[in-house]
Amino acid sequence: MNIGEGIERASMNKPALLKQYADRLSPGRGKPQFVKAVQDYLSSTDVLDRASVAVWVMRMERRGLSPGTIKLRFGAVRTFFKVCKLDWGFRRGEGPRVTEQDEKRPALSLGVVSREVMAARDGMVPTECVAFLAIATTYGFRRGEMAAIGPDDVRPDLIFRHTEKGGRPRWHQIPPEIAPYIHQHDWSLVKNREGEWVPRYSPDYIGQIFWYVVNATGGLDALKSIRLGWHAYRRPLLRLLVDNGCGGLAAKRFLCWGSGEGESDAMPLRYYANTEIDIEGEVVVSREAESDTEIFEKYHPYLKLWEAK
């Protein structure tokens, strides 16, 4: 059987190939977006080859997707081809690129964040949205990380972070300033169409919540013409932590920076101890969370905004 016959035969059973790909993915909370990208590609073609991928990329460009999103989806399809043992056809270095001009990293100013937090504390922001604003401004959670939070991830004084983009999952302290907003939220699971128990909010819905906060705050009409999302809190949080005196590695560790987000820091981030075994052999999951104390007390730019007056 030559390559052409293999491609044609593979294209006849796309659901099975998609399942094969999905089953091989790690259970990280970024998995749904990768599966969705491959589904989008498969729905665009009946032949699985280099040419069909190139056409799919052009269609994404015409749809106005950002270069970063296109590159991420392209990578998901590349992994799909590899897992399913299909001929990829692209050489190393070929495919979508993200140039410095393409990269737009908008960050909300301290004034905007202050206005939003004040609106949330004054009851102007819908209750279901306030917990996510508190989490985004305190920890810099990504959209998918917030969507992944379930009842087992929230304890009286700890919250678990299911990281994306190669970051290491970890527990965080819940400081008293935001504890009421975290614990008043309903983190229970719901059943999906397949009868599985899953977190009640999808990443797409979490993306909408960002704009619910903006719209409810008032006075932020200028933001509505700008492409924004939850990273608009994450980016300034990193910068302000460092500007306030927090070490760069400690700040990235706090934000669960992925090992690929800064080559020079990859090894220290990967090897920093995230658990500790006590004398009886038990894993102390809160040990790393204790490192949050210094950040909250000395360097955090937003936490004071949540203090009860």
Image (cartoon, helix red, strand yellow):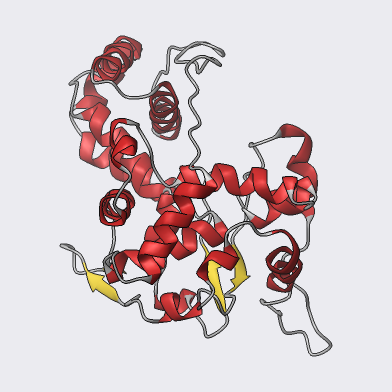
Residue 29 in sight here: no
Residue 61 relative to residue 99: left or right = left
Q: Residue furthest toward the right? A: 279
Q: Residue furthest toward the bottom? A: 280
From the viewer's side, name the closer residue of 302 and 267: 302
Residue 84, x across and y down, in percent: 39, 33
In the displayed structure, would residue 93 be above or below residue 283?
above
From the viewer's side, name the closer residue of 102 and 215: 215
In the displayed structure, would residue 294 be above or below residue 268?
below
Residue at the (40%, 48%) spot, across then down = 31
From the viewer's side, name the closer residue of 209 and 269: 209
In the displayed structure, would residue 52 be above or below residue 202?
above
Residue 280, x across and y down, in percent: 79, 90
Q: Quadrant of residue 95?
A: top left
Residue 270, x across and y down, in percent: 73, 50
Q: Quadrant of residue 74?
A: top left
Residue at the (73%, 74%) spot, across then down = 290
Residue 304, x across and y down, in percent: 59, 67
Residue at the (34%, 37%) spot, across then down = 223
Q: Quadrant of the N terminus?
A: top left
From the viewer's side, name the closer residue of 82 and 238: 238
Residue 285 relative to residue 228: left or right = right
Residue at the (42%, 18%) spot, across then down = 88
Residue 258 relative to residue 61: left or right = right
The total number of labels drawn is 0
Residue 289 relative to residue 166: left or right = right
Residue 174 in sight here: yes
